[in-house]
Image: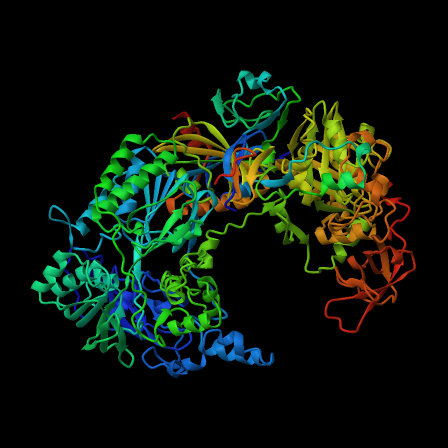
Amino acid sequence: MENIKKLSPVVFKARPVKTEVRDNQTVVLEYVGEELGPYLTDLSHKIRWDVQDSNLDAIKPWGIAIPETPGLSVLENGFLINRMNRTQASVWHLAGEKPDDPDDSAYTETTDATMFVALTGRETFAIAEKLTSLDFAVPDKKAPFLLQGPIAHVPCQIVTLAQNGEHCGLLFTCSRGYAQSMIGAILEAGEEFGLRPAGETAFNKFLTQ
Amino acid sequence: MALTITCPICGKRNGYEFRFGGEEKGPRPAEHELNPETWCDYVHNNNCAAGVQNEWWFHRDGCGSWFTIFRNTLTNLEVDGPEETNE
Amino acid sequence: MNRFYQLPTLRIDPTRKKTFTYLGKTYQGVDGDTVAAALYANGIRIFARSLKYHRPRGLYSMDGECSNTCMEVDNIPNVRAENTLLKNGMTVKAQNVKGTPEKDFMGFMDKMSWAMPAGFYYNTMHKPASIWPIALKQIRKVAGLGKLAPDFEMTGKYDEIFPTADVCVIGGGPAGMNAALAAAENGLRVILLESRPWLGGFFEYRAAQYQNETPLFQRARDLAKQVADTPDIRTFTHTAMVGAYNNNLITAFQTGGADDSFDQRYIEIRAQSVVVATGCIERPLLFENNEKPGIMQIACAHRLARTYGLLPGEKAVFSIGHDLGLEAAIDLFDLGLKISCVADIREDGQDPDLVEIMRRKKIPLLRGWVATDAHGKKTLNKVTLSTLQGTRDKEFACDLLVASAGMTPVTGPLAVAQAELCFDNHTGFFLPANLPVKMHAAGRMLGLNDALAIEASGRSAGLLAAADCGSSVDTSLNEARADLENLPGPVKGSKMVTAPVKGDKTFICFDEDTTVKNIKQAIKKGFDVAELIKRFTSASTGPGQGGIPGHNLPLFVAQYNADPDVSAKPTTIRPPLVPTFIATYAGANHDMCKRTPLDALQKKAGGVFRRIGVWSRARYFSQDFTCRDEIENVRNNVGLFDASTLGKFRIWGPDALKALQRVYVGDMSKIADGKIKYSAMCNEDACIIDDGVVIKRGENDYYFTTSTARAGAAVEWIRYHTRYDGWNFNMVNLTDALGVINLAGPNARKVLAKVTDADISNDAFPYAGYREFKIKDTIPVRVMRLGFVGELSYELHTPSSYMPALWEILEDAGSEFGIRNFGLEAQNVLRMEKCHLIIGAESEQRTTLHDVGLGFLWDRTKTDTKTVGAFALKQTEKQDGRLKLVGFKMENSDARAPRDGSIIVDSKIRGYVCIARNSHTLNEVVGLALVDESLAETGTKLEIYEDECGDERLYAVVALTPFYDPDAKRLKM
């Protein structure tokens, strides 16, 4: 096979220092001058599925039970599973070996349908509140949890991964077509806090913290 | 838009996340039951209540559900049920 | 001018100088100065000229309550100089001035006021009507506020923020801070908004005693520190609340300081509960020449000294109606101000301690006296005082008159939140009678004046707000209420509205130059309600939004009418409560648009992009906007088109077919494997809203496309029309998951065959077929043989991440044929030659499926599916008087194409041109139009009227369609 490449919808101006080719796609592990956060990491290459069924509770993606209540998420074995409504959940594969394709019509692979980024660092919510009125840092909710709503007027799925002091992080997806506008809006909102692009390694470190 | 709407899935949100779906008028009539008058009533004629009405909304920017709420059209506030006026 | 540098209340840093220019001259201020304070420190007394009469105007309220101190700062007009902090290098100019503020050539306008009674414009400028344009020009020359240069571009950085809060407290004075602290004690997230750059409000600048030898300003600082030390309270200072809407949506804007990343930012807060503690401003005293420079309100004079270190004048007269006036007189006297006399409207009721101090300091006090006239050519030099009845008077030379009738609550936030305000006889205030749900008022705006009572009231409101958020506060609330009951209640307010004067030059509204005489004129004309008098005289319609005329206008009208049946009501005020830049409302103004996976490649290929709906799309690939080369290449060779914006969906599940039957007019049960089904969706009125194809990919598993414009609404539409059925089906929007390349032209098969092993011969993969295979063994594609542009073509749907690779592969494979891009405009012409429709271009809201000639798509036999639009399709099938879609050619073969949207006329409008182009393929002008059915016969002459064409017309003739390849051979090649 010749050199056929997949491309992410997200393009940062920063220069990569470490990259890795995975499944026909170049993944940036680290950018020049990452230093301290807050970070914006492109995770669009991470595989994602939409799972829909009238009897969703009977479906156990890779052996993991889907949370019963819409708005709840579960992070297990590198899979983040978010209950969207009565019949629908999203599955985001964050870490580990590439999983096999599920053999069940309830699944639709949606990796290419959305752009997928992580916003991490102490100032995460200070940046987010410049883009949306959604409340990601609800004190009485336990992370991870899902919100479906607009960021910069674009419908998104947003998961609060962590919300304690220094350790704050959001993951979110929006329609792939909006990627460039969305990244521009986030970086502009984060400029005053020193928001910078970071590679996958920084996110992995965040995830294991 | 300052109106808030309570989505059964996502909770209370700003009104501009939603699309209005008209008054609640009951299930779609069968085609053979329709004549121009009943069709017009189902499609176009509305009660336009000056007070509480039961109406459809779609959470366009959120979970994508269609659902009904009660809204007082005089105050443009969502209310709990058909009788409440929220005064 | 000498400044105090040692006062503990100062908010300036005299060691840090700031340089600015005013009227071309360089001046110095200090850090912490507002523009107004810095000008005052440099001896500037006249800041502007008034709207109509060009009267000199000066410092009055210190809080930007009127246009007196609206100035042009760094080319931005109408900047409130009293609220704007001085920055190094600022350029400041006066507004509405011909010459200088000191010597304004339009100053004579003041003598013309007799010629301009209330309603002057309404009554005079339209008789005869031809006067108006001339008058308008002249009035604009002499009247108005700031001027905007035609090439003006707003500078600065504007931002926005949507912070989350349980409780929002408006007003960072003692009541507001106590409310915020009380709510935060209950673990709630609190936002505190304060219009000044610091917290403290009513206490902040005063040296009077709070308790146990602690001065008020110290108490303000202690409270501010407590607030700062409470992590759950977020304070936004220098933040003007400008709007309140349903369900406690509060909007505000904040002015950035030296360390902020923004100049101004818009703030929007949705709070569960709101506390309004905005305190009071002073009610302006109405007397002759009451706005002459040198006349200012109590807090203005007091804060000039205490906050900015500036003694407001040398020799002063006070005419006041509140103990604050006495306190300020004593304090300013101690700071070195000479005071000739203090006239107090109140005959009695003064704080005896203050009266005693004044006696000791030999400050003369006249009870039951009031200022009636201010003298001086441009600035004040003499004041006339008289008894309230006007029976005796006295004159005093002075350069400062501190004038104020009493207090008036800042009810703007309550008013815009639709609270009901009722006049209260004891306080003389408009008090909230009916507050919106989960909104509370506290502090001085309720008439409280005692420091401890103000604080207790704030605390109690904060606890009520906490209760709104579900906190259990019973015990603490009972305590707070008991505290409040044991403290002094609301104080009696002064009743006087106007001094005993005729009112010719007694200004009730500074912004609009409205006098008491004007109000009387309006009343004589029969206007009896303040709200209407406001319209007729324009009083309180200026930038101050009723700050100065505020409650004086309704009170004066009530008093003048002396009608006990009409209860005084404040006039309506609307957001924004203070003047706000449009740029601030616009905020960060992110331009959110969608880009296809080929965006970068197409830009590189010279694509000219246009924003179309939510998408940015390549419209042309050269500067030849007729796209001749792009079109000819598709017709004769092969072209590539990015159709990724098409809506794409998966629908599956046991009831998926039922759902498709509901929304598509065709019979979806008859979709053959490996074939595409073209169909349309109508709305209930049988009007066509969408067309697309449906493919059956498996048992109960379909893939369908929609037009670009309908992609966002497809799921919503299907779910809406099945919402009562309880059907079991699922949908996923794949619009962005899959990109689409249309490979079109007679050489398309040759190109595609080079990159796939699949059999794509015409037999194996005929027209209207559907196949799935791989490109170069790697890229999965879903391929449809369609012919939108009228040629052999393959629509390749492929995962978006592979789109750039696929594009390059096809370009590479096609290079031997001279493959090239074509853009949206070329596609538009190509499909029009073939008479393929674009919904929205050849249809509008009233156009039915029948009107555009697609009635054959409707399957009338599926009557049990409750298909959306089916009933209306039946009803409109034979309906008369509809606009029908026709093709046309120009009558005269060398005529140019009419513009899209031109109308078709005879004696009436009979239709319009949907699209018309000079077709390079056909070598003539062709187009599509919606015309009255009486004109739809082939051969009918159409008369076309273009915008601004005068008597000229274009003539066309209805022609047979399609224009290109009528036998449809080329699609099936």
Of B64 and C31, the residue lying toward us: B64
Q: Tell whether A201 sits left or right of C878.
A: left
Would you identify the image quadrant in which residue C463 lies? Answer: top left
Quadrant location of the C terminus of chain C in the rendered image: top right
Look at 54% across and 37% down and name the residue there: A156
Residue C511's spot in the image, x, y percent?
Answer: 39, 68
Q: Is residue C250 above or below residue C931?
A: above
**Residue C682 at least partly seen:** no
Q: State the image coordinates of residue C708 (x, y, percent, origin top left).
A: 68, 44
Report the colour scheme.
rainbow
Residue at the limit of the structure toward the front, as seen here: C564
- Quadrant location of the N terminus of chain C in the rendered image: bottom left
Closest to the observer, C525 or C398? C525
Q: Which image quadrant for residue C918?
A: bottom right
**In this orientation, which residue lies closer to the viewer: C29 or A42?**
C29
Name the residue: 69% across, 29% down. C651
Q: Is residue C156 visible?
A: yes
Judge by depth and name the residue closer to the eye, C768 or C405: C405
Q: Is residue C341 above or below residue C109?
A: above
Number of marks drawn: 0
Whole-percent x, y for residue C481 in the image: 27, 38
Report x, y in % for residue C460.
Answer: 29, 39
